[in-house]
Amino acid sequence: MEKQLEKIDILRHSAAHVLAAAVLEMFPKAKFAIGPSIEDGFYYDFDLPRSLTQEDLPELEKKMKAIIKKNFVFERKEMPVKEAIEFFKEMEQPYKVELIEDLVKNGKVETVSVYTSGNFVDLCRGPHLESTGKIDSEAVKLTKIAGAYWRGDEKNKMLQRIYGTAWETKADLENYIKRLEEAEKRDHRKIGKTRTCSLSTMLLPVCLFSIQKELLFIMSSRIFGLKPRKILIMTLFFAHQCLMSQYGNNPAIGIIIKRICILLRLAKMKKNLLCGRWTVRALFWSTIIRRNLTAICLCAMRKWG
């Protein structure tokens, strides 16, 4: 199992170098930071002349496939640190220079290893595959772009990180993508955000109505001195009209509408129906309906919709 994991890590680290070579073709002045293998994939951090977009990923994938097809050999070379620093300074790669200088300070190393594949040269301890052609071009996919501070320090420059995944076969990649899609479907955080956004958009008229009717009931209760029973009837009536006009076809809201109709009929049946302790309940429920109509609708849609 450990050997298998090590093998896939080497494959992914090699794929990160292929990605860097593809970025170099697209941006000759690109500056390279680090590109390790990670769980289920790899990433590489770049300092680029412009911001990347998701539309750039297919183009980079195309360039990666071309590099893989050319079957460049991964050539390792040991280089004295002074020579390596001068070499990467000439290439205008300040992040590589900084890494080498830190290696000298912390480890007192005398040499560093660099890998060459085609026109791309990178500071790297390896190991790598024999050549780029050992990577299955159909089993590599770039997944997303993110921002990342150099060395994780917010005081440093923000770099652009490209994430990708690489597998031994196309079938492995397809299985991985399928697992991601299934996990995404079960992601309650995303589901909640999606539903909340969707429902909030749907219930925007209700939210606006809530503000209007709140003012209406404050005015009616204070200026006209309406009794609790009248307040409840008006609350139910306006809630019913609003929901019918906006969401009459929604089965979840239909349940609320039916229950409002029942309460409305009960409230209209007798003038003395809402007396004594019912007066308190009428005021309570009218306040609840008026101030929480949107939340009630949201809950109803999640439960019955």
Image (cartoon, grey):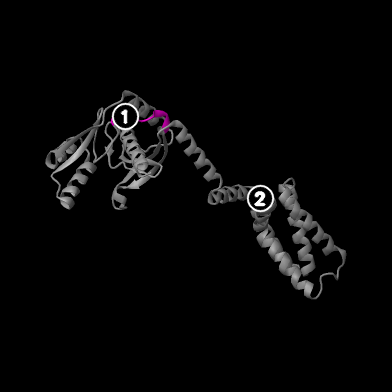
In the structure shown, which secondary structural element does the residue marked by tag 2 occupy? helix
Q: Is residue 113 among what the camera can see?
A: yes
Give the CA distance from mark 1 to mark 2: 58 Å
Q: Is residue 188 magenta?
A: no
Main secondary-structure element of the magenta-colored stretch:
helix
The residue closer to the viewer here, 34 or 116, is: 116
> How far across and how far down the image is residue 257, in percent?
76, 54
Drawn side of residue 218 relative to residue 15, left or right: right
| Part of the protein shown in magenta | 130-139
* Residue, far bottom: 276
Question: Residue at 72% of width from left, 51% of height from top?
Answer: 253
Q: Position of residue 216 (x, y in %)?
A: 70, 61
- Circles 1 and 2 in contact, beta carbons < 8 Å: no
Write down the residue under mark 2: 205
Residue at image coords 86%, 68%: 271
The mark that comes first in sequence, 1 or 2, is 1
Q: Which quadrant: the N terminus?
A: top left
Question: Would you name the residue on which mark 1 appears?
Answer: 132
